[in-house]
Image (cartoon, rainbow, N blue to C red):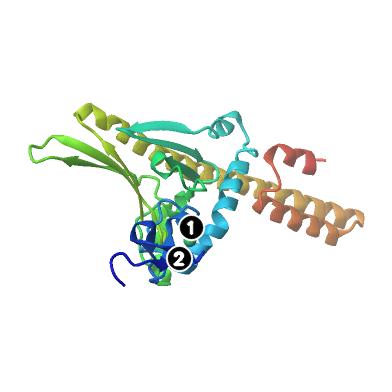
């Protein structure tokens, strides 16, 4: 077990030296080649062998699903979200895009160009990491934290030298994932005006998160309105069926099916009138 000894990667079996491997939380080794199949923001010392395997199995599908999510965008604004925007954080270039309806975003750092997948992150995990001990009270607390529209979870940390001059900045995104407890994007900032771009990126992500919560509130209100209309329509159909000797059971069944479709988002508001205002 000397400093220069080689160890086998637990995934591909390749024997690699110290500079070409990382130690997993569960003490096995992962080689740099296999690590490129995981999330670039994951820390291997937080990541178990199973968690690493899970990332390798799911990241490609998550990225593909995220890409597809823009196809179903309901309006021009949302389809405009598909393109990546670029921030030059000092000498460090970062690209970001977000689907505010889905509540997910992607970040590419040029430092991670050798990684295979662009990771997808979710706003409902964008809160400070805490161990989940299965406490139900804590769960309710976590949910209120996730839906707190005033929270600005993304922050900027400024680094200064001994004379108090700014040297670097870091955008910090807290993340409630066992392998990724923070997403950190740092770069040089030689003078005060250099820091604006870091605050700009932080503000973009914070405002996208608010847009996601607002979209959710809007969706819930829209669903409620549709359910109330469906209740009224179903009651009318039942009365009509009862009065004319029609099929009451069928009218009830129709109403329940429509209620379920509304919950699942299968009924769009525009179609609603056409379907049920005969
Ligand atoms: Zn390997």
Q: Position of residue 238 (x, y in %)?
A: 81, 55
Residue 259 visible here: yes
Q: Which residue is mark 2?
A: 9
Q: Position of residue 39 (x, y in %)?
A: 46, 53
Residue drawn at the location 71% of the way across and 46% of the way down:
267
Name the element at disc 2: loop
Q: Position of residue 248 (x, y in %)?
A: 85, 59
Give the CA distance from mark 2 to mark 1.
Answer: 8 Å
Q: Is mark 1 within 8 Å of ligand 1?
A: yes
- Which corner quadrant holds the N terminus? bottom left
Q: Which residue is mark 1?
A: 34
Q: Is residue 166 above or below residue 60?
A: above
Q: Is residue 197 above or below residue 233?
A: above
Q: Are marks 2 and 1 in contact (CB under 8 Å)?
A: yes
Q: Is residue 179 above or below residue 76?
A: below
Name the element at disc 1: helix
Name which of mark 2 and mark 1 comes first in the sequence: 2
- Which corner quadrant holds the C terminus? top right
Q: Nearer the viewer, residue 201 or 160?
A: 160
Q: Is mark 2 within 8 Å of ligand 1?
A: yes
Q: Relative to 76, is 206 on the left or the right?
A: left
Rendering quarter of residue 204: top left
């Amino acid at each position: 077990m000397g400093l220069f000894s080689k160890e086998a990667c637990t995934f591909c079996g390749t024997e690699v030296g110290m500079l070409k491997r990382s130690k997993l939380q569960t003490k096995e080794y992962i080689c740099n080649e296999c690590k490129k199949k995981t999330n670039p923001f994951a820390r291997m010392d937080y990541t178990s062998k199973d968690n690493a395997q899970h990332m390798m199995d799911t990241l490609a599908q998550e990225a593909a699903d995220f890409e597809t999510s823009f196809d179903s965008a309901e309006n021009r604004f949302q389809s405009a979200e598909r393109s990546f925007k670029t921030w030059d954080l000092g000498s460090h270039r970062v690209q970001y895009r977000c689907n505010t309806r889905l509540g997910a975003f992607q970040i590419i750092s040029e430092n991670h160009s050798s990684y295979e997948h662009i990771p997808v992150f979710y706003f409902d995990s964008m809160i400070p990491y805490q161990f989940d001990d299965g406490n139900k009270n804590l769960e309710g607390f976590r949910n209120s934290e996730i839906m707190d529209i005033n929270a600005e979870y993304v922050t900027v940390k400024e680094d200064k030298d001994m004379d108090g001059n700014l040297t670097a900045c870091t955008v910090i995104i807290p993340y409630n994932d066992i392998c990724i407890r923070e997403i950190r994007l740092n770069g040089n900032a030689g003078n005060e005006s250099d820091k604006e771009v870091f605050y700009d990126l932080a503000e973009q992500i914070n405002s996208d998160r608010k847009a996601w919560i607002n979209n959710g509130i809007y969706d819930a209100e829209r669903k409620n309105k549709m359910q109330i209309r469906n209740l009224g329509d179903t009651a009318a159909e039942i009365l009509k069926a009862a009065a004319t000797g029609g099929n009451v059971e069928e009218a009830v069944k129709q109403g329940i099916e429509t209620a379920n479709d509304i919950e699942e988002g299968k009924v769009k508001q525009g179609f609603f009138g056409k379907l049920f205002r005969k």
